[in-house]
Image (tube, rainbow, N blue to C red):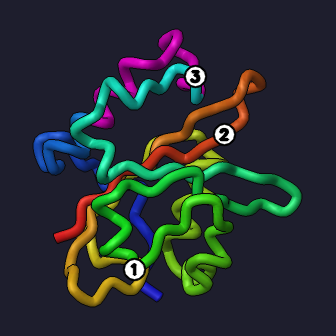
């Protein structure tokens, strides 16, 4: 297992990959009000067409808490070695349960905060040494985290 993501690191956008920064600024722009998080219907993929190959979404299911791939960008499929859309995360990638990534997903659901990470990939992708990733919550009408919107850049 790769270590957990440090949620206290004060990364600034100037240190981020430009694609990470772009989706974060887009996510901020679709907040309905300053004190509300965006919902799925606030997100329009046509607004970020150039980023879609790196975008992925996980649906949140409760009791028990599980994640299901809503979509995986086409540039990520060859990196991860499969197309998991429609599959449960723990079935598509059994090692994810013991990875820091799974804890990161829980963090986003629990805190409803975006989470940035740059470091060693938490899934096994031997050709890549670094992942830069942003996870952002999308909520339902009751303000519960319904979807994790992610963008990942592997180098």
Splitting the image into 4 quarters, where does residue 93 fall?
bottom right
Left/right placement of residue 14 relative to residue 80 reads left
Say if 41 sits above or below 12 in the image: above
Image coordinates for residue 125, horizontal then vertical, percent? 33, 83
Q: Which of marks 1 and 3 is nearer the N terminus?
A: 3
Image coordinates for residue 122, horizontal then vertical, percent? 41, 78
Q: Is mark 1 on a helix, strand or loop?
A: loop
Say if 68 sits above or below 2 in the image: above
Left/right placement of residue 4 relative to residue 138 reads left
Q: Give the range drawn in magenta.
A: 23-39
The residue at the far right in this view is: 63
Label 1 neighbour load within 10 Å: few <14, some 14-19, many 20+:
few
Label 3 neighbour load within 10 Å: few <14, some 14-19, many 20+:
few
Label 2 neighbour load within 10 Å: few <14, some 14-19, many 20+:
many
Cα–Cα span, label 1 and label 2: 28 Å
Q: What element carries label 3?
A: helix
Residue at the location (57% across, 67% down)?
A: 103
Image coordinates for residue 56, horizontal then vertical, percent? 44, 52
Question: Foreground mark, 1 or 2?
Answer: 1
Residue at the location (40% across, 31% down)?
A: 45
Read off the residue under disc 3.
Answer: 41
Question: Foreground mark, 1 or 3?
Answer: 1
Splitting the image into 4 quarters, where does residue 121 fall?
bottom left
Read off the residue under disc 1.
Answer: 81
Read off the residue under disc 2.
Answer: 145
Residue at the location (52% across, 20% down)?
A: 42
């Amino acid at each position: 297992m790769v270590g957990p993501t440090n949620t206290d690191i004060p990364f600034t956008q100037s240190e981020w990959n430009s694609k990470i920064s772009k989706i974060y600024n887009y996510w901020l722009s679709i907040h309905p009000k300053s004190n509300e998080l965006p919902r799925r219907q606030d997100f329009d993929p046509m607004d970020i067409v150039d980023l879609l190959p790196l975008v992925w979404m996980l649906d949140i299911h409760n009791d028990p808490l599980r994640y299901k791939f809503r979509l995986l960008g086409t540039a990520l499929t060859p990196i991860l070695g499969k197309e998991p859309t429609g599959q449960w995360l723990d079935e598509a990638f059994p090692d994810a349960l013991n990875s820091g990534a799974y804890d990161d997903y829980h963090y986003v659901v629990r805190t409803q905060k975006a989470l940035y990470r740059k470091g060693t990939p938490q899934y096994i992708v031997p050709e890549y040494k670094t992942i830069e990733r942003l996870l952002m919550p999308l909520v339902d009408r009751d303000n519960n985290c319904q979807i994790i919107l992610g963008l990942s850049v592997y180098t």
